[in-house]
Amino acid sequence: MSDTALPYMPADGRPRCRWCAAAADYPPYLHYHDTEWGFPVADERRLFEKLCLEGFQSGLSWRTILAKREAFRAAFANFEHASVAGFDDGDVTRLLQDAGIVRHRGKIEASINNARRAIELVAETGSLAAYLWRYEPAPGSYDEPVVRATSPESVAMSKDLKKRGWKFVGPTTMYALMQAMGLVNDHSLACVTREQVSAARRAFRSPAA
């Protein structure tokens, strides 16, 4: 998600990114934009959740995923990757019967697989955060937000994760993750949240440092 079009102006009169127009009849979408999207994240549980949910979003809208997020959390052990790594065929069957989530076998099995790969990655690199923040672009690389689906960093991250056995981690999905977890600030220049995110990024200490 990113845009350079005229901003969306909700009832509070504060301009937001154009994609927030989808929040007109769904306030949690605007709240997500204002308080989560683009703010830097280093928490392991939250990062694994974002990894999984970006994979589930593939081919769908983020609004669809956001509306199901609490159901996803309940179904996937609150996205504690050590717990999800222990899921078995019975859990796959259970999840395929859960109407509260996206019942896509490939994405469900990918999330379980990725939890197991996350354990391996943490053993090697120390944490998911330390690994993911290695892919933060150089300062100034994306000062001007533009509409893009991938970046050199998301392509490199995708290639490396696939080599490690991760699934549903294509370059477009990984760029969406980069936007969501704050590796880039893709709020539009007119958006009131852009400077808040910039300030949060300036105060954030990268775990990859």
Image: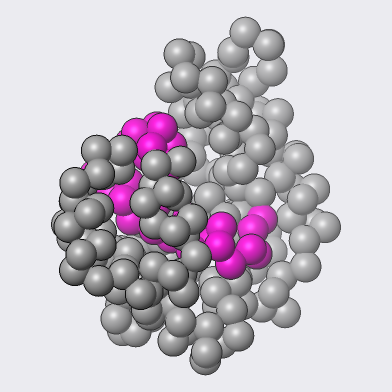
Residue at 77% x, 68% y: name it. Answer: 205
Magenta part mainly helix, strand or loop? helix
Rendering quarter of residue 181: bottom right
| Relative to 67, residue 179 above or below | below
| Relative to 70, residue 201 above or below | below
Q: Is residue 186 magenta?
A: no
Residue at 58% x, 67% y: name it. Answer: 44
Q: Position of residue 58 (x, y in %)?
A: 28, 49
The residue sitting at the right extreme is 203
Residue at 45% x, 49% y: name it. Answer: 73
The residue sitting at the bottom extreme is 124
For the question of whether residue 60 can be seen, the reply is: no
Quadrant of the drawing holding the C terminus: bottom right
Q: Nearer the viewer, residue 127 or 193?
A: 127
Quadrant of the drawing holding the N terminus: top left
Q: Position of residue 9 (x, y in %)?
A: 59, 14
In the image, the segment drawn in magenta is 40-69
| Relative to 62, residue 44 above or below | below
Q: Position of residue 13 (x, y in %)?
A: 68, 11
Q: Position of residue 122 (x, y in %)?
A: 53, 83
- What is the number of callouts on the image? 0
Q: Nearer the viewer, residue 101 or 122?
A: 101
Q: Relative to 168, is 79 on the left or the right? A: right
Q: Relative to 72, is 24 on the left or the right? A: right
Rendering quarter of residue 92: bottom left
| Relative to 120, residue 198 above or below | above
Q: Relative to 27, is 41 on the left or the right? A: right
